[in-house]
Structure formats: structure tokens, C-alpha cells
Image (cartoon, coloured by chain):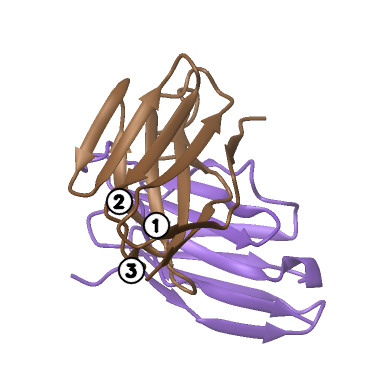
Amino acid sequence: QKEVEQNSGPLSVPEGAIASLNCTYSDRGSQSFFWYRQYSGKSPELIMFIYSNGDKEDGRFTAQLNKASQYVSLLIRDSQPSDSATYLCAVNSMGGSQGNLIFGKGTKLSVKP
Amino acid sequence: DAGVIQSPRHEVTEMGQEVTLRCKPISGHNSLFWYRQTMMRGLELLIYFNNNVPIDDSGMPEDRFSAKMPNASFSTLKIQPSEPRDSAVYFCASSRSSGRARGGELFFGEGSRLTVL
């Protein structure tokens, strides 16, 4: 059973702080990793993807991947109240069909003004 | 461009009734996914089509669930008979394998919230 684990939170950070969201996955053969954001009552939307070990930065967001530890994280710098949402980690395993993503249950982030 | 369109947005039905959820993917996308989301189990993949062909239906809970994709612009998810434990938000999503995220960028519809009494 391929699994993606996330701390459900809620994670509460003050405005302007760095929010750190973590995710572990069970399938060592996984090749592609994604972070989706889901606002309450809305559908998920892709915000970051990463394939190689190391860091990938996009604006205030940085995705970090460590395949040896089977660990992927998302850092949000200068957190804003508008970042308050549930963040879903998703993994595309090597054995799965292209685009067949396994999602974690998500971490709820609350950014306090 | 129109996004993924799902209908109905809300459905309330009684146990034992048939439920049909509908989805129109984004034009040009070659993959279509049906997901179910609950608080307890999160977002679960039910079935995945590629070029209208079902590729992976291992997530379909049981024979009460069935899905079809008769053409590139339409898909249905049917539950017959429905049970209270089927209550969830059902999302349809589409993607294209040539996209920026190697097919991992799923575009979700707004979801169909199903309540089975």
C-alpha cells in the first residue's frame, strides 16, 4: 500500500513568518512530487512540483526533496493570511500511470495577522 | 478557457437510490480522474482514464461504483445503489501528459457534494 503521510495540523504561524510543511512517502520508487493548495470549500490547485533532490524556489515558495529520506517539504516565506489553506502533498509513483497521483490528507495552515 | 465542469454541484438522495455524477474535462486534456474526498480518508483516487480508456480502477470501492468515458469530452461516475457511507465530495480532474508537470498538474472541477440519507 503506497502511502503519503502529512501532519494534519493545524499549523499556526504569525504573518510574516516562515511556514514549514512536511511530507513523507512510502514508495521508494516515486519520481515526481507535488504540492497542492486547497482553500476551504474549494478544489485543489497545483502550486509547486519537484523531481530532483534539492531545493526548488518559486517566489515565496520553496519545495525541498530528499529521496534518500523519502521526504518532501514546502516552505512558505513571509506568510500571509491569504496563505491560510490546506496543503496537500502528492506523489506519482514509478509504478503508477503517468499523472496517477497519491495524495496525503493535507496539513491545514493558519496564518494569523 | 473553461475549466473542468462538474454537475450537479450538490446532490441529496436517499439510501438505495442511483446517483450519476457528470464531468466535462478541459478540451485537449488526455487524462481524466475521479477522486473522492472525505475528512477521514482525504483525497482518494477512484478511477483514471487515459485517452478515454480506463487505466486504473483499483480505487473503486466496490461494484456499486462504475465510471464511463464515452468520448473525450464527457465522463460519468455512477453509484447504484447509494449508501450513507458514500457521502463525500467527488472531484473530477483532467490533465495533459505534455503539460509543464509531466501530467502531474491536475485541473480539478469544483466538485459534487453528495449526501446520502
Q: Specify whether B113 is left or right of A51.
A: right
Tell me the crowding category of disc 3: few under 14, some 14 to 19, or many 20 or more residues within 10 angstroms, Cα based.
few
Q: Are marks 1 and 2 on the same chain?
A: yes
First reached walking from the N terminus: tag 1 or tag 2: 1
Query: Which residue is label 2 attached to?
Result: A47
Q: Specify whether B31 is left or right of A68.
A: left
- Tell me if label 2 and label 3 are in contact, CB under 8 Å: no
User: At 33% from the left edge and 52% from the top edge, which residue is drawn?
Assistant: A46
Query: Which residue is label 3 attached to?
Result: A82
Q: Are marks 2 and 3 on the same chain?
A: yes
Q: Nearer the viewer, residue A49 or B64?
A: A49
Query: Which residue is label 1 attached to?
Result: A37
Horizontal and vertical percent for residue B9?
50, 81
Under mark 1, the amino acid is Arg
Residue B50, image quadrant: top left
Distance between the alpha carbons at the discs numbered 2 and 3: 14 Å
User: At 67% from the left edge and 85% from the top edge, which residue is drawn?
Assistant: B12
Q: Are marks 1 and 3 on the same chain?
A: yes
Q: Specify whether B97 is left or right of B86.
A: left
User: At 68% from the left edge and 53% from the top edge, which residue is drawn?
Assistant: B41
